[in-house]
Amino acid sequence: MYNNKIKNRLVFILIISGVFIFFRYIVTPVSQYNHLTLSENISTFIYDIITFIALSWLIKSLGEAFFSKINDKNLNFKQLLRLCMIQTGILLLITIAFIIFQNYFFHKIGYLQDKNWLRLKELVFILIWVSIVVFGAEMGKILVKKWKQSVSDYSNLSQKMIFWQLTALKMQLDPHFMFNNYSVLNNLIKKDPQKAGIFLDKLSNIQQYLHQNIEHDLVTLEQEITFIQQYFYLMKIRYKERIDLNINIKAFSSHIKIPPLTLQLLIENALKHNKATLESPLIISIGIEDNFLIVENNLQIIVPLSSSSKIGLNNIRERYQLLGDQQITIEKTRDKFTVRLPLL
């Protein structure tokens, strides 16, 4: 990490030095050096390189020092303009002082360059433009960093919102599920205490499954089907031969998943809104078709769906949307009610 930082700094300094030299020999016509000897031209070129490397290092160091003081959260145009002017002003003062020292030094050793005022003007011009470019580059880095942080923060916030929404939806399932089954148990205790005991044992097993999987966003289809078979056993105690469940799934894959308690809510919904008699039993079928889980029942309405709270269907719909923007499909015909669930 430290070595990369040094390497990046050196590359930056060399690039800016190259820009300085490029500007220097565009701004200054070559004819101005025609009166100099070859050795003087080489000496001047080497001197320029050393000067520009020093100035590049100064620009880089000042830029890092200034931008380290910027608070990304309170970034504004006035703050940036002020920093740019301060940085450029400091660089100009240092450059002017450097030129004055240089002229004094060369005068002492008997070598004085011609037209030093022109050299000063050139350096000031180049320095201003390079400072603006470097400042813009540093500003760009900050803006990109800020943008990436904003995207990351938004993504984290979205994930947290989805997590808490899913948690809230799943918290609805436990009391909703248990309330209905305790009502059944209460009726059984009054009518058939022995069956009530069996019902309570099965309910305990179901409650264990509920606590193990309610914290998961998804469970395997095989787990859910096993749970539904236990749940439907309890419903058979209450409804006897008035209801039936057909599971038309030949094989299970561990990769096929659905939200937990989805099938339980659909079966409960069917039991709540349909008649179930010995003459016309309620038949619920579960199968797979085109990567969808199909849950359907014969329609024998006793309570219009428009007057119900639709807690179960809305819960399933919202969880599918949160888990991957998936849509469930509900189809209602004259004699059949079908729900198509995407397999995840």
Image (cartoon, rainbow, N blue to C red):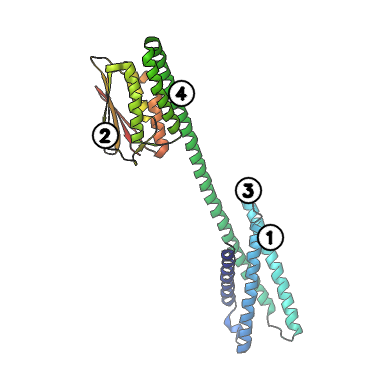
Percent x, y for residue 338? Answer: 28, 28
The answer to which of marks 3 and 4 sits earlier in the sequence is 3
Location of mark 4 (residue): 175
Tag nearer the camera, 1 or 4: 4
Tag nearer the camera, 2 or 3: 2
The residue at the point 60 percent across, 78 percent down is 28
Percent x, y for residue 138? Answer: 59, 60
Location of mark 3 (residue): 74
Task: Work out how far the residue at label 2 is from the one at label 3, CA to CA, in angstroms.
Answer: 59 Å
The residue at the point 71 percent across, 73 percent down is 98
Task: Work out how far the residue at label 1 is from the one at label 2, CA to CA, in angstroms.
Answer: 75 Å
Query: Are circles 3 and 4 on residues that touch, CB within 8 Å?
Result: no
Tag nearer the camera, 2 or 4: 2
Location of mark 2 (residue): 249
User: What element does badge 2 sit on?
Assistant: loop
The residue at the point 53 percent across, 47 percent down is 150
Amino acid identity at mark 4 = Pro
Task: Work out how far the residue at label 1 is from the one at label 4, CA to CA, in angstroms.
Answer: 65 Å
Tag nearer the camera, 3 or 4: 4
Few, some or many residues within 10 Å of mark 4 (<14, 14–19, 20+)? few
Count every numbered label the image shows and give the total. Answer: 4
Few, some or many residues within 10 Å of mark 1 (<14, 14–19, 20+)? few
Tag nearer the camera, 3 or 1: 3
User: What element does badge 4 sit on?
Assistant: helix
Amino acid identity at mark 2 = Ile
Observer-nearest of 130 and 169: 169
Quadrant of the rendering where the N terminus is positioned: bottom right
Would residue 274 appear left or right of 208 to someone viewing this image? left
